[in-house]
Image (cartoon, helix red, strand yellow):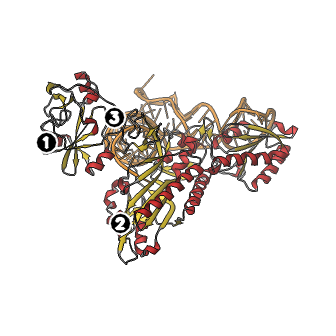
Amino acid sequence: MRFSRAFIPTLREEPSEAEVTSHKLMLRSGMIRLHASGVYSYLPLGWRVMRKVEGIIREEMERIGAQEFLLPSLSRRDLWERTGRWEEYGENMFRLKDRRGADLALAPTHEEVFAEIASHEIRSYRDLPQIWYQIGTKFRDEARPRSGVLRGRQFIMKDSYSFDTDEEGLKRSYELHREAYLKIFKRCGLDVVTVKAHSGIMGGSESEEFMVPSPAGEDKLVLCGSCGYAANVEVAASVPAPSGGTSRPREKVHTPGMRTIEEVSGFLGRPPSKLMKSLIFMAGERPVMVLVRGDYEVNEAKLEGEIGPFRPAEPEEIERITGAPVGFVGPVGLEGVEILADETIRGQVDLATGANLEDYHWVGLEPERDFRVDRYVDVRTVREGDGCPKCGAGLRVLSAIEVGHIFQLGTKYSEALGATYLDEKGRAHPIVMGSYGIGLERIVASVIEQHADESGIVWPISIAPYEIYILPVNWSDPKTRDAAEELYGKLSDGHEVLLDDRDERAGVKFKDADLLGIPVRLTLGRGLKDGKVEVRRRKDGRTWEVPLEDAAGKVEEVLEELWNEVR
RNA sequence: CGGGGCGUAGCGCAGACAGGUCAGCGCGCCUGCUUCGGGAGCAGGAGGUCCCCGGUUCAAAUCCGGGCGCCCCGACCA
């Protein structure tokens, strides 16, 4: 491609709308433009990268025997009602009506649609297993799109679905995906961490996420540096830091206006770890009190696992249930409400919490001695420095981007949609399903987050929009031009080459070349009078002066090394 | 959905909380000359419904009301 004819609208200044590195660079390099909040147009350069990623994914999916489909984005209401997700997805699903008033959704994912096909077409155990996939557009009306392409309302995903006769088969399909995913990320030049995850609205048992550590990420990842334990903070366990204290009789103290942990802690002169948070949640109509040590937060994903869907109680409800206003509630003497205590409360002495009386707190509390605990559970959010649940070493908490998620769904969808098969004895069983997703633009953005410097993007060779950037310093000089044209012709046979034939100053070309992040640059400039050209590697700036006639060979050599890094 | 910020030329911004002499700056774009290995210099030039609608006023980018859009924090989220 000749730069003079290419549509690559680079920006020399940072667009004010962008915050994170990948977003800024994707705009500046002319990969994308905003169309609406969370909705982007892919310009040629950006689309080239997306297609490279798509190609890698497709190869690895085909390698595990997956077959490509293309399913519709418009989806019938009744299908989603049969699995309960028409309701469950709520505001996050784009909905529309056709001219007859029939309800349709823009599909946010395709479990239902694939499962429905399976329900119609798969009849016998002989038809199984199957792995089906597609690469297509998903729609989710996110409450807050952000970080450019990282959380969009319209995005491209590779989603696949496995269909097996039993759990054992599911595990095999799941493992195939896990390995394929690791290859895909490796080939895209991404370092990922695999973590245990929360299944959420997808349902099912086992689920793992593929995370790219990055400050731009929205997820929190818990990592043990010594044994390798890794989990999403939504499900991570830990050994809490000890809090000490000595047993004493309980005592009611006057704490006028002291409601928050900070206020009570300061007023009573005791650390938050010697306080106890007493929180009221509503699981449907049923109130539940949750107790957790004052220096920890309740983890909503974990709590949902214990009590099902819930919401925090309203202030009026809290007062009705405990007789005290928010900030002064506690478990002592509380009847008719289930009391769950986080493990951080077990065996504690001298805790302080609300006395169910305005302006009063208890101190010196001990669980079971002073208040009832119906169940001990793990519902706290892990903190940096907590002990690893496996080896006890200190845990780290990092931000990360979720680039892939794999689920062992089981029979949730097949049962709801009647997707069954007949076994050898003619008995019907629900098909056992798995579902597996990779976000394409998240891969692209993550790669930029991991591979960029002050000057711009540093593409891994495998997904670079072009492999070689030929930079003739002075395009109006005939000798330079001839040499550039010759190399362009030679290298274009087998490679994707961008020839900067613009009549621009050298500085402009260098800046653009760095910004675009093409892995290998070939500069034709002052050395040319001695028959020399310069080969430069984008990632580390290493350069080689070589005779013009050896240039193509040297480029091939550098490219080969770059390819070796992503194989 | 709560909180905050913003919307003026293609991009980045000033002007507004003192209404008029306020349609501005830098970059980019076009023309010419010079320059030519890290976002050139000089000269000339094009380009704007000041987000939209309504109101106040002799007069509105500026004040008031309503709306739309974008970004950030939080809630939310496979």
A462 lies left or right of A35: right
Residue located 44% across and 57% down the image: A139
Q: CA distance from mark 2 to mark 1?
A: 40 Å
* Side (left or right) of A440 relative to A458: left
Nearer the observer: mark 2 or 1; the answer is 1
Q: Which mark is residue A77?
A: 2
- Residue at the far front: name it: A391
The front one of A544 and A388 is A388
Q: Chain of mark 1?
A: A
Quadrant of the image occupied by residue A324 = top left
Q: How far across and down, in percent of the image, does residue A268 sit?
A: 22, 22
Residue A554 shown left or right of residue A395 in the figure: right
- Residue on which the image places disc 1: A320
Q: Residues within 10 Å of mark 2 (few under 14, many from 20)?
A: some
In terms of secondary structure, where does tag 3 sit?
loop
Q: Which mark is residue A240?
A: 3
Q: Nearer the viewer, mark 3 or mark 1?
A: 3
Q: Is residue A455 visible?
A: yes
Query: Could you say which is closer to the camera, residue A359 or residue A232?
Result: A232
Mark nearer the N terminus (3 vs 1): 3
Q: Nearer the viewer, residue A356 or A363?
A: A363
To the question of a shared chain for discs 3 and 1, the answer is yes
SS at mark 1 in the image = helix
Label 2 residue SS: helix
The crowd level at tag 3 (other Cα within 10 Å; few <14, some 14-19, many 20+) is many
Image x and y of residue B24, in percent: 57, 32
- What amino acid does circle 2 point to? Arg
Tell me which label, 2 or 1, sits earlier in the chain. 2
Separation of marks 3 and 2 at Cα, in angstroms: 46 Å
Count neighbours of disc 1 (C-alpha within 10 A) and say few if under 14, some if 14 to 19, many if 20 or more. few
